[in-house]
Amino acid sequence: MHIGEVDVSRIVLDAKSRDDIPQILRGLPHLYIDQNTRAKIFHLLETELAPEVSKLTGRPGMTLWSIFVCGVIRLDLSIDHDRLHELVNQHNAIRQRLGHGLFDPASYHFQTLKDNVSLFTPELLGKINQIVVDTGHDLVRKKVGEVLRGRCDSFVVETNVHYPTDISLLFDACRKVIELTARLSADQGSSDWRQHAYNVKQVKRHLRAAQSTKRRKGRNDAQQVFSVFQTHTEWISKGKAGVPVELGLRVCIMEDQHRFILHHQVMEKQTDDQVAVAMVKETKQRFADLESCSFDKGFHSPANQQELQAHLKLVALPRKGKLSQQAQAVQNAEDFIKARRQHSAVESAINALEVHGLDRCPDDGIRGFKRYVALAVVARNIHRIGAILREQENRRAKRKTRYADRDMPHKLAA
C-alpha cells in the first residue's frame, strides 16, 4: 500500500445510489476479496490472456486486474472506449477499484485501453463467467444441495451496420470517388477518366443486382451477405410487433432462478430448435446440478423433446400444433405449469443485457462479436452480485436501526 491508496474492502460507496457504477463497483471487489475466487480468476488471466506474451519481462503495462475491470465496466455501462478512457482517468471510485491512490498520477492512454481490452477471448470469458456464477451462488443459496432451474430463450444482437444494408452507402462512396477523381483528372488536363459516367453506371448495375439478391434473401450462403463490412450479419425476422426485421445475430442464453446467466451461445445461421440440446448439455458440463429447464415453442422438435428428457428431470417445452392426450397430460402437470409461468422472467435478463450493451455490437468481425457478447454476460453477472450485496447492506442497515430504536430507554418528543 502507498500513501493515498485505499484497501479494496474499505472503499465506501453510496448505499442509496441507483446508478450502475456503484452496482458494478460492489461486485468487482467481492471477486477480489475472496481469496479462492481471486486465485482462480488470476490463474486464468495469467495463462490465457495473451499467452504468447511474457508477463514478467518487457515494459510495464496495464495490470491483469485493470484489464479485467476496464472490460467489465465498458460493457456494464454500455459505453465506447472514449468514455471508458475518461472514466478510468477521472472517476475517483473507479480509479480506487483499479488500485490507484489519491496521489497516484498514473493515467491510461486511449489506444492502450482499446488494445488490452481486446485481448479477451470468448473461451476465456466463458471460464471466468463460470467462476463468477459460482461465487454468486454462494451468496444466494440458502440450502445445501439446492438444484438449478433454467430458463432458455434467444434474442437478436444487432451488428453495427446501416439499415437495410451497407450497399447504398458503399455505392455513394464509389460514385463520389469516381466523380472526384474524374474532376481532378480534368483539372490536370488528363483524359484518362473521360469514361467516368459509364463507370458510375456499371457500379449502379452491381448495386441493383445486390439489392435484388437481398430481396430474394439469396439462393445460397455465398449470396446471403447483408453487410460488406460485417459479413456475419444475418437478416432476421422474429415476428415482433413494430420490429419487422433485425440485422445481426441471434444469441441464446440460459438463466437460473437466481437470475444469473449460466451459459450463452452465438447462433450463426441457426434457429432455436437447433441449439436447444446443445445449450442444455454445455450448461450441465459447467453446472451439473441443473435439473430442469423451460423453453418457448420455437425450441420444439420431436427429437428435442426426446433427447432433452435424457439430460433433465423436467423439460418444460411446449409442443406445436394439436396435442395428443399424452402431450396434454404432460403440459397440464403442476411442475410443467409452474415452470412455464416462471419462464417469462428470462425476458428481464434479456432486457438487462440489452440495456447494458447488448442491443448493438460496435466491435468488428465475428470474433469481436463473440467477445463482446461474452464480456457482456460476465459484466451482467457481476452487476447481479453487486445488486445482491447492496440488498444485504440495506437489510443490515434497517435491522440495525430497528434494534437501536428498540433498545433506547426513552424517546424525545417530536
Image: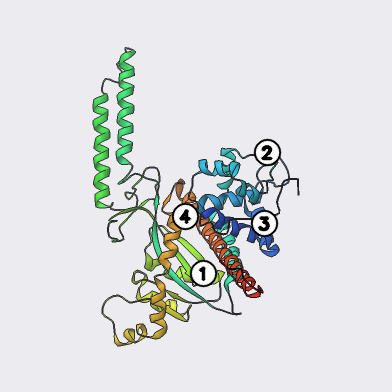
Image-quadrant location for residue 266: bottom left
State if disc 1 and disc 4 touch (CB < 8 Å). Answer: no
- Residue at which label 1 appears: 283
Q: Kindly identify which residue carries mark 3.
A: 42
Q: Earlier in the sequence, mark 1 or mark 2?
A: 2
Give how far across and how far down residue 315 sits, in percent. 42, 78
Label 4 element class:
helix
Residue 114 visible within the image: no
Q: Amino acid at mark 1?
A: Thr
On screen, residue 265 versus residue 391, left or right, reads: left
For label 4, the residue is: 356
Seen from this angle, which residue lies furthest top? 189
Q: CA distance from mark 4 to mark 3?
A: 25 Å
10 Å crowding of disc 2: few (<14), some (14-19), many (20+): few
Tag shown at residue 232: none
Seen in the image, is 203 located left or right of residue 112?
left
Question: Reading the chain from its start, which is encountered first: label 4 or label 1?
Answer: 1
- Between the residue at mark 4 and the residue at mark 1, the CA separation in whole angstroms equals 23 Å
Disc 3 marks a residue whose amino acid type is Phe
Q: Amino acid at mark 2?
A: Pro
Q: Foreground residue, 179 or 253?
A: 253
**Residue 223 in the image: x percent, y percent?**
31, 49
- The answer to whether marks 4 and 2 mark residues whose Cβ atoms lie closer than 8 Å is no
Q: Quadrant of residue 308?
A: bottom left
What distance separates the C-alpha of mark 4 from that of mark 2?
30 Å
Identify the residue shown where x is 56% and y is 74%: 288
Mark before the other along the chain sequence, 4 or 2: 2
Q: Residue at x 59, y 63 (%)?
A: 132
Q: Quadrant of residue 412?
A: bottom right
